[in-house]
């Protein structure tokens, strides 16, 4: 059995899929699963060349790791898996562009293929609502943790509170976090390129911050280690991997009371209304002032992250690969 991974050519700020499957491939290698990687060599303007490229490089099993759903259009549907992370691309467009995206990225690939994995129950429900006829094809295989799990180290009497923000796109909702903290003594570490509006809020309120762009995985791990709180009140995610990364590194998590964030976090996060600046501020003050709450969240977060180890998640993919081989 040899797996051929079909992958997009990532651009700046879009490496989460690559990071995830890099970790999973390491686990597959340890389990002696053979695989080869094929990265799309063409821009979208050469769409048909990309289709031919993938068609000519099929393996015993083809696994499209995400985003380039259309890569499936000329592949053998009996031996191809598509992993769908979210449907956020669809919501970026209107009119004819939205229709074309729906047709090429969602409708045709999902109707064609027999094997579709999704990373959360939330994504599964979105697809089922949009295309009820493909519901029976969907299997939830969650993301795995992509950082090492540190030994539990409880934080007591935190002062000069450091808050980590991962991601600066509109769905990350960081403007409300900044507004919530304008009269709190905190220091921000912001991962991702900040826009003019975000910079204006920071500067007008004299907020202290460091901005990190295109940082390495090791540097991101250090930021989790150095910060006290991950504030992640996202409005939309396919999964929410920073939640697990923070829990693994003893960084206390504040996140949205929305799916899939609340399911991914388990009992190891303080859930808030992401549309309420007041709720975000209250949660930060709670964590700063309540020792028992901090300890509880850290202990439960440390327990939660163990459900998402690379070994456990890779095994779910291996079982699916074996099922496909057996069905041939």
Image (cartoon, rainbow, N blue to C red):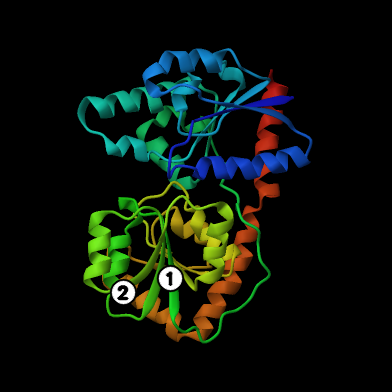
Q: Looking at the image, which is closer to me, 292 or 216?
A: 216
With respect to residue 34, does 155 lie above or below?
below
With respect to residue 76, does 214 lie above or below?
below
Q: Quadrant of the N terminus?
A: top right
Task: Work out how far the residue at label 2 is from the one at label 1, CA to CA, in angstroms.
Answer: 10 Å
Of labels 2 and 1, earlier in sequence is: 1
| Image location (x, y in percent) of residue 212 | 43, 58
> Quarter of the image holding residue 207?
bottom left
Q: Label 1, secondary structure: give it.
A: strand
Q: For mark 1, what is the residue? A: 163
- In the rendered structure, the answer to whether residue 23 lies left or right of residue 117 reads right
The reply to whether residue 226 is visible in this rendering is yes
Q: For mark 2, what is the residue? A: 181
With respect to residue 180, does 194 lie above or below?
above
Q: Which residue corresponds to the image point at 40% horizontal and 31% vertical from the top-left?
A: 132
**Classed neighbour count for the residue bearing mark 1: other residues with Cα under 10 Å, few (<14), some (14–19), many (≥20):** many
Q: Quadrant of the C terminus?
A: top right
| Image location (x, y in percent) of residue 185 | 35, 81
| Image location (x, y in percent) of residue 101 | 33, 27
Whether label 2 touches label 1, CB < 8 Å: yes
Q: Which residue corresponds to the image point at 43% horizontal and 27% vertical from the top-left?
A: 133
């Amino acid at each position: 059995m040899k797996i051929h991974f079909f992958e997009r050519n990532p651009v700046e700020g879009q490496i989460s899929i690559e990071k995830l499957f890099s970790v999973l491939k390491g686990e597959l290698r340890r389990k002696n699963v053979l695989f080869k990687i094929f990265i799309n060599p063409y821009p979208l303007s050469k769409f048909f060349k990309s289709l031919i490229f993938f068609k000519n490089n099929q393996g015993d099993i083809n696994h499209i790791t995400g985003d380039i759903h259309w890569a499936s259009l000329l592949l053998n549907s009996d031996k191809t898996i598509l992993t769908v992370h979210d449907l956020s691309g669809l919501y970026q467009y209107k009119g004819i562009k939205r229709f074309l995206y729906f047709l090429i990225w969602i409708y045709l690939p999902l109707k064609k293929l027999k094997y579709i994995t999704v990373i959360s129950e939330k994504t599964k429900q979105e697809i089922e609502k949009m295309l009820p006829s493909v519901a029976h094809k969907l299997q939830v295989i969650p993301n795995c943790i992509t950082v090492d799990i540190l030994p539990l180290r409880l934080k007591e009497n935190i002062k000069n509170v450091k808050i980590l923000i991962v991601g600066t796109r509109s769905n990350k909702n960081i403007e409300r976090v900044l507004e919530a903290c304008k009269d709190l003594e905190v220091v921000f570490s912001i991962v991702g390129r900040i826009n003019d509006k975000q910079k204006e809020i920071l500067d007008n309120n004299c907020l202290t911050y460091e901005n990190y762009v295109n940082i390495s995985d090791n540097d991101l791990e250090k930021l989790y280690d150095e910060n006290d709180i991950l504030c992640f009140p996202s409005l939309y995610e396919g999964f929410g991997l920073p939640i697990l990364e923070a829990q693994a590194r003893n960084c206390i998590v504040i996140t949205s009371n929305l799916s899939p964030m609340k399911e991914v976090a388990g009992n190891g996060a303080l859930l808030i209304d992401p549309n309420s600046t007041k709720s975000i501020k209250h949660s930060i003050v709670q964590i700063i002032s309540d020792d028992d709450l901090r300890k509880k969240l850290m202990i439960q977060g440390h327990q939660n992250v163990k459900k998402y180890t690379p070994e456990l998640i890779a095994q779910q993919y291996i079982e699916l690969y074996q099922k496909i081989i057996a069905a041939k």
